[in-house]
């Protein structure tokens, strides 16, 4: 006769055993859960363990964790949280030192509660040197001190998805790197104090920004800064409405800005500045009512875009030569006039013509090419009859601008 009690117990044992093995099989054996009881030494030992391999995860499972020292990442792992863990760090050094490529951060809120030394010695939440692939998603960076940055990377390969950077101190930077091949999607940068920079690439950036907002709430701040940028904006808002601030400042840019809104309306501020640029700005709103809206090279097409600069300044300013008449002088009782011609533009001018009108007569003189920021003096000899204060004289410049268009300045008068 079958003992039903023993049979029922055996079935229950089998079910429990199968469930345990099923759970073990669904999670990597080397994943490590971090609780409030986990020490820094525990994390370091897990990182060094031979059983920890590429693709394993360091998982923060509680709402808060106080990190006592830098986590040195030596393997291609995931660092994540399913509960949006608030990781608090009170040291004036990096929270994460990345010594391996193929690292992913996700679901974290990183509270860096410290100060760097000064603007030349910022402390970063994440740092690495060399070339590494690092992806960051669904995470928040709270820079709760002065002279901090979210990252300080070497040659960065990787993307940013759905992140938020809050710069709550002066001289805070968001993502900074030497070179970058990657994009930013669906993110928000809020830089609350002076001298901030949301995105800074020291050398070359290849990548774009999509569906992202940048708010600069302090003076002398920059939204996007790079030496060279191959990429663009799509559906991006940059609000740099404080004194001496830039929406975008890039030395060399190739790409497209579309469906974006850039506001930089305070004194001496600029919306878009790129000296060596080629590409398209389309369907954008760029406003800089206290300065320049758009300053770009002649190879940029501005299409269906509302640009507003300070009164008296071109809404779209193209870098090029710009000639201006300077001082007119002569020695007493002399017939020889010295007329200065200045190039106040950004590029070397081609040869120009200077015409002096006196009575019903005129004389035209050739003006040689002038380097940017320099001037030349043209010597003009007038007949003795007209070289006196009795007769009013006029002078005008004719030159060719960066597009090959002939420009004639207004006549300037002199009477001596």
Image: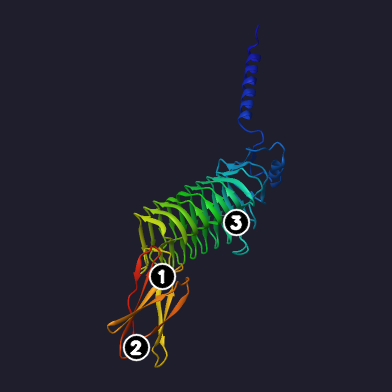
Q: Which of the two labelled residues, at mark 3 and mark 2, occupies the earlier sequence position?
A: 3
Tell me the residue that label 3 is attached to: 113
Mark 3–mark 1 Cα distance, whole angstroms, equals 50 Å
Please tell me whether mark 3 sits on a helix, a strand or a loop: loop
Q: Mark 2 packing: few (<14 Cα in 10 Å), some, or many (20+)?
A: few
Tell me the residue that label 2 is attached to: 383
Q: Could you tell whether 413 is left or right of 107 in the image? A: left
Q: Is residue 211 above or below residue 296?
A: above
User: Which numbered mark, 2 or 1, is in the foreground of this view?
Assistant: 2
Instruction: Look at 49% across and 65% down and name the residue there.
Output: 220
Residue 294 locus on image (x, y percent) = 41, 61
Q: Is residue 325 above or below residue 22?
A: below
Q: Which of the two labelled residues, at mark 3 and mark 1, occupies the earlier sequence position?
A: 3
Mark 2–mark 1 Cα distance, whole angstroms, equals 31 Å
Q: Residue furthest top?
A: 1
Residue 114 locus on image (x, y percent) = 61, 58
Give residue 322's mark.
1
Residue nearest the viewer, comparing 115 with 270: 270
Please tell me whether mark 2 sits on a helix, a strand or a loop: loop
Please tell me whether mark 1 sits on a helix, a strand or a loop: loop
């Amino acid at each position: 006769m079958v003992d039903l009690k023993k049979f029922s117990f055996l079935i229950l044992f089998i079910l429990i055993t199968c469930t345990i093995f099923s759970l073990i099989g669904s999670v990597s054996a080397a994943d490590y859960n971090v609780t409030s009881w986990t020490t820094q030494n525990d994390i370091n030992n897990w990182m060094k363990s031979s059983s920890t391999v590429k693709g394993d995860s360091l998982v923060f499972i509680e709402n808060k964790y106080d990190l006592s020292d830098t986590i040195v990442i030596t393997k291609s792992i995931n660092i994540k949280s399913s509960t949006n863990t608030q990781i608090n760090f009170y040291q004036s050094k990096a929270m994460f030192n990345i010594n391996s490529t193929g690292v992913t951060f996700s679901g974290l809120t990183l509270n860096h509660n410290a100060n760097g030394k000064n603007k030349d010695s910022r402390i970063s939440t994440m740092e690495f040197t060399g070339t590494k692939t690092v992806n960051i998603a669904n995470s928040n960076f709270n820079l709760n001190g002065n002279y901090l940055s979210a990252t300080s990377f070497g040659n960065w390969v990787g993307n940013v998805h759905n992140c938020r950077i809050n710069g709550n101190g002066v001289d805070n930077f968001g993502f900074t790197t030497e070179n970058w091949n990657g994009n930013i999607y669906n993110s928000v940068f809020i830089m609350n104090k002076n001298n901030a920079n949301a995105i800074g690439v020291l050398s070359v950036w290849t990548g774009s920004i999509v569906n992202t907002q940048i708010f600069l709430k302090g003076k002398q701040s920059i939204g996007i800064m790079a030496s060279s940028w191959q990429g663009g904006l799509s559906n991006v808002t940059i609000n740099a409405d404080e004194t001496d601030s830039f929406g975008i400042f890039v030395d060399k840019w190739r790409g497209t800005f579309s469906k974006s809104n850039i506001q930089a309306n305070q004194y001496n501020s600029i919306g878009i500045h790129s000296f060596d640029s080629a590409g398209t700005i389309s369907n954008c709103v760029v406003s800089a009512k206290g300065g320049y809206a758009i300053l770009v090279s002649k190879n940029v097409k501005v299409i269906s875009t509302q640009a507003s600069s300070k009164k008296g300044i071109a809404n779209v300013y193209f870098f090029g030569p710009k000639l201006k008449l300077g001082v007119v002088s002569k020695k007493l009782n002399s017939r020889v006039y010295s007329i200065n011609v200045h190039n106040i533009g950004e590029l070397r001018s081609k040869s120009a013509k200077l015409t002096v009108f006196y009575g019903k007569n005129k004389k035209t003189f050739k003006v040689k090419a002038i380097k940017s920021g320099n001037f030349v003096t043209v010597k003009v000899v007038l007949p003795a009859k007209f070289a006196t204060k009795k007769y009013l004289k006029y002078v005008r410049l004719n030159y060719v601008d960066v597009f090959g268009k002939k420009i004639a300045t207004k006549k300037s008068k002199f009477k001596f």
